[in-house]
Image (spheres, helix red, strand yellow):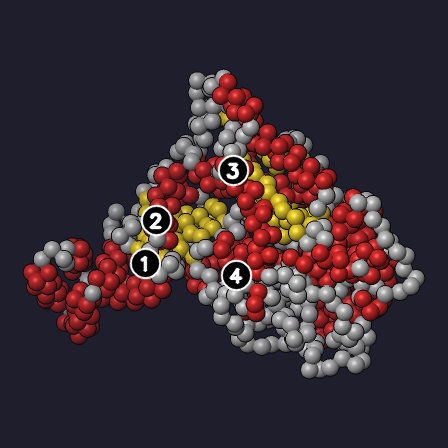
Amino acid sequence: MKKEKIDLFYGALLHDIGKVIQRATGERKKHALVGADWFDEITDNQVISDQIRYHMANYQSDKLSNDHLAYITYIADNIASGVDRRQSNEESDEDASAKIWDTYTNQADIFNVFGAQTDKRYFKPTVLNLKSEPNFASATYEPFSKGDYAAIATRIKNELAEFEFNQAQIDSLLNLFEATLSFVPSSTNTKEIADISLAEHSRLTAAFALAIYDHLEDKGRHNYKEDLFTKASAFYEEEAFLLASFDLSGIQDFIYNIATSGAAKQLKARSLYLDFMSEYIADSLLDKLGLNRANLLYVGGGHAYFVLANTEKTVETLVQFEKDFNQFLLANFQTRLYVAFGWGSFAAKDIMSELNSPESYRQVYQKASRMISEKKISRYDYQTLMLLNRGGKSSERECEICHSVENLVSYHDQKVCDICRGLYQFSKEIAHDHFIITENGGLPIGPNACLKGVAFEKLSHEEFSRVYVKNDYKAGTVKATLVFVGDYQFTTIDKYADLSKNENKLGIKRLAVVRLDVDDLGAAFMAGFSQQGNGQYSTLSRSATFSRSMSLFFKVFINQFASDKKLSIIYAGGDDVFAIGSWQDIIAFTVELRQNFIIWTNGKLTLSAGIGLFADKTPISLMAHQTGELEEAAKDNGNDNKKDSISLFSTDYTFKFDQFITNIYDDKLEQIRYFFNHQDERGKNFIYKLIELLRNYESEEKMNVARLAYYLTRLEELTDKEERDKFKQFKKLFFKWYTNNESDRKEAELALLLYVYEIRKD
């Protein structure tokens, strides 16, 4: 990236830093002036300083040349905000009205304007700490103080004091802004909704600034004052941008469709490998375009979105990059993995709340989506298909892990392909927090690029082009790209079945797998902000904030929900999860995750889950397949189209989530435990008779009711005298469950079954 673009990035990202300083000091003058003066105390980069000082329409200066970068930052700020800002005053002007500005307001929840119902929830004033409990939004209004802002300002200044403002430190500053400004509102105008963070707004401003620069540079237009200030309204109409996206196909099959031998050791490594492949695809493309991760709106689950310049060079780069990367995938994975890119042009007016419509906003995304869909239908050209069909198998044997027939080698008494051999080594490295991209010596991840996990203290001994760090902000200490990864692991997979037994060696020796994902996330992403305010909340900044919110939940905080539970998170994409562990802990984890998700989204989104129960030697591919079928059963549950369900062990046990949690997990199962824990073996044997009666209710209804009365009477006789009063309550309760309705009977059946699994001697 050339020096001018680097300065543009820093100026655009830092353009609103004055808001933090003025809120910390109470200084009553324009934030642009406050920010520039503050920046001048740190370094003497005049180009960056001028962008901060002159990014506002009412504070332009005649001393600025027509090609000054401040004009790009000015209009990029407007586009990122979604409004054409031409008001003369702001929160700290001398004449600013307290009725309009609420300087210390805390940030509103993005879900307040999501869906049909308007809500009022707020985040606590804090920094983003990936290791602490999630900052759940609530109805409690707790404004910032000057001290809160002073602490943030001090942290940023201390970090920037060590900055050289070069290309190598771009990701570090993005990390720093995300860590400190994720819960700082960009605007405190009471006439607006303060649900966009200063971190997100600043990042998006930088993204648009770089795209605008490339667009105008391509056309040889350097009179920025005329194009972007004097005639700004015309530029809003110009299709200067591309929304680009990619979809990495084959992820599920690559992770799960592997043979038994060596599968367990590789399972987590495979998932993490594809996480990093998506990150690497995004970063490699941005490098070729002379951009950075500010232009990356979202990456996760094999998908990504970018804001790029609408130029022939950009399109040519996208086409060539897609071709080159698919050649790498074909050479290493045959047809198992495939990446498709899509893009569509748009004008600023299409994504600005003052100018767009919900339909025009959706069309921006639909252009890219349609192109991807078309490519996935016809992946390969004629020449590639001929090449694939030419020689058949190159070996008479298959890889014992993934069944590939290409490039087989001997490794640990197995015949494996190059990739599976690399995954063996990578599986030993995944405990590290730092991962490097190097030209050789690791797991192939792209053309002439390899992935390798490295201990932090050994980084200085390695040669690499990029370093990633998991779930930790390393601004300043190491020039690393932060990636979110759901990677909690209690122990190795082969131990979970044994861990399902309690301290008394009771319980069925089984492990469980859960697969879950968010219901109708695609539709929500496209139209979730269009239902209120005549679509005025459909903005790119909200879509980006929404995506970031999903990533935080499913890739970072999910590790906390799993904490201390006997399970491993194998895969956690942007909205879907695959975890394996002791069956009791998998159920507990699923319940906790779902309940936290409802809080996180304020009930605006739901998820559905399937939980399968398996012997410890079951092939991974079979567990994944059967649990996937349970997940689909959950999504097909009911006629209300709301999904929000869980299917456990069998499609027969499919319930709405609230029904399972409230009626079974927290109620019936507890009631059954309370009584049967006081029974001896003879008493507990009656559980199987009760289950049988529940299952056969319809066959001989009257006779079965009589049998139930008999069994319950026998249980009462077996119950110790001091416990009989308690049992009479249970007897009455169970009889009610049995005779009430089919739903109660099915709930009672599953509750009894769960209890049997808890106490069975296997």
Q: Which kind of residue does numbered mark 2 sit on?
A: Leu
Q: Which kind of residue does numbered mark 3 sit on?
A: Lys
Q: Which residue is mark 2?
A: 630
Q: Which residue is mark 1?
A: 638
Q: Which kind of residue does numbered mark 4 sit on?
A: Gly
- Residue 196, compared with residue 462, is above or below; it is below
Among the 4 quarters of the image, the one containing residue 428: top right
Q: Nearer the viewer, mark 2 or mark 3?
A: 3
Q: CA distance from mark 2 to mark 1?
A: 14 Å
The spot of residue 683 in percent (x, y) is 16, 60
- Tell me which numbered mark, 1 or 4, is placed earlier along the sequence: 4
Q: Residues within 10 Å of mark 2 (few under 14, many from 20)?
A: many
Q: CA distance from mark 1 to mark 3?
A: 32 Å
The spot of residue 427 in percent (x, y) is 52, 38
Label 1 near label 2: C-beta < 8 Å? Answer: no
User: Residue at left 73%, top 62%?
Assistant: 78
Q: CA distance from mark 2 to mark 3?
A: 27 Å
Q: Which residue is mark 3?
A: 376
Label 3 near label 4: C-beta < 8 Å? Answer: no
The spot of residue 749 in percent (x, y) is 23, 58
Residue in the foreground of this view, choosing between 385 and 27: 385
554 vs 677, left or right, is right
For the residue labelled by badge 2, is the local secondary structure a helix, a strand or a loop?
A: helix
Q: Which kind of residue does numbered mark 1 sit on?
A: Gly
